[in-house]
Amino acid sequence: MRKKQTALVVAKAALLVPVCYTAAAHQALSEPDVKLPTAAAGATAEPVRAGAPPVGTASAGAPRAGAPPVGTASAGAPPVGTAGEGTVRAADLLAATRSCTQVSLGKYRTDDDAPEDIPVCATRDAVFWKADMDIDCDGREGKTCNPRTDPLFQPTTAYQQSDGRQLDAENLPYVVVPGASHRWNHTEHGVTGGTVAAVVHRDKVQYAVVGDTGPTDLIGEASYATARALGINPDPRKGGAGPDVTYILFKGSKAQPIESHRAAVARGDELARQLVARN
């Protein structure tokens, strides 16, 4: 779980190594067409493209020699017209979530100095929001996620693997949900650890699981592996993306075990097809 407060960044950096933290620049976000802006509405992850760099490398350069692509659900090339993972096009998922029926009782900031303008929306099958992407490197310490590379690094995640170990942000695509509060309690909408998510950035779809929770007033964060797979700079200090990332969480779904990306892709692709068909 992360804190985006500037003061904390400076304080923690001073205790570790001299680093310069630059948050992803916040840009104005076009507000969705909100149907129900106040009360909660009752409503009930394609193989990696050939040649795409593997998840978990330290930079956006060439992949490590001999490293296999991460997150392949099956062999073979992706269907024509898709990018990222699964069989559902990014454009179709964005179309299915174009209209917002707001279920959060308030809106969220993407960063401390940003306006509160991000609602959590819902369909019968999913909750979703459009925000930026900050990089979560928390959990198991590795080569690219550790206290030396990330001044906000924390050795734990809100949810753990089936063997009790912390999640591996370097290699497991996961998303972060705001901590439960009066504004929005994710558990009341069928969202918890392991819930399957589709993350859409431009023309790419990446399936993931809910793996961590964050501050109760901020939204828009995913693991190093999620960003890397989407072609977003995964550097926890200066990486991330602007407010053009759509997070879709499928209510009541679960990747079992939580650390199985293969399970998240298979279940997510099925649920994404259903979402598109119904919307």
Image: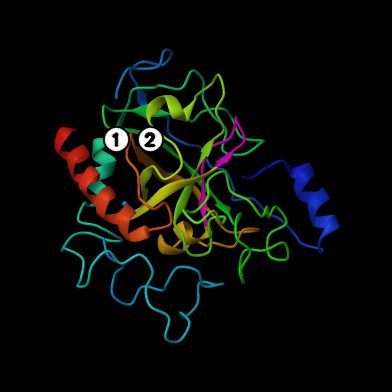
Camera-side residue: 96 or 104?
104
Q: Which residue is mark 1?
A: 97
Camera-side residue: 94 or 39?
39
Residue at x 68% of width, y 52% of height: 154
Q: Quadrant of residue 173?
A: bottom left
Residues at marks 2 and 1 touching, judged by CB atoms closer than 8 Å: yes
Residue at x 21% of width, y 51% of height: 88
Q: Quadrant of residue 97?
A: top left
Residue positioned most to the bottom: 65
Q: Quadrant of residue 216?
A: top right
Residue at x 46% of width, y 30% of height: 186
Query: Is residue 47 one of those drawn in magenta?
Result: no
Relative to residue 222, is residue 145 drawn left or right?
Answer: right
Q: Which residues are magenta?
A: 213-223
Instruction: Tell me, yes or no, if residue 130 can be seen here.
Output: yes
Q: Which of the numbered marks, if any, corresponds to residue 128? A: 2
Look at the image and name its color scheme. Answer: rainbow
Q: Position of residue 20 (x, y in %)?
A: 75, 59
- Quarter in which the C terminus is drawn: top left
Relative to residue 225, is residue 151 drawn left or right?
Answer: right
Tell me the amino acid under the disc marked 1. Thr
Q: Is residue 81 above or below residue 113?
A: below
Residue at x 24% of width, y 57% of height: 86
Residue positioned most to the top: 39
User: Which of the two labelled residues, at mark 2 and mark 1, occupies the earlier sequence position?
Assistant: 1
Q: Which of the numbered marks, if any, corresponds to residue 164? A: none
Q: Residues within 10 Å of mark 1 (few under 14, many from 20)?
A: many
Query: Viewer-nearest of labels 2 and 1?
Result: 2
Q: Position of residue 15 (x, y in %)?
A: 85, 56
Camera-side residue: 141 or 247?
141
Q: Is residue 261 above or below residue 100?
A: below
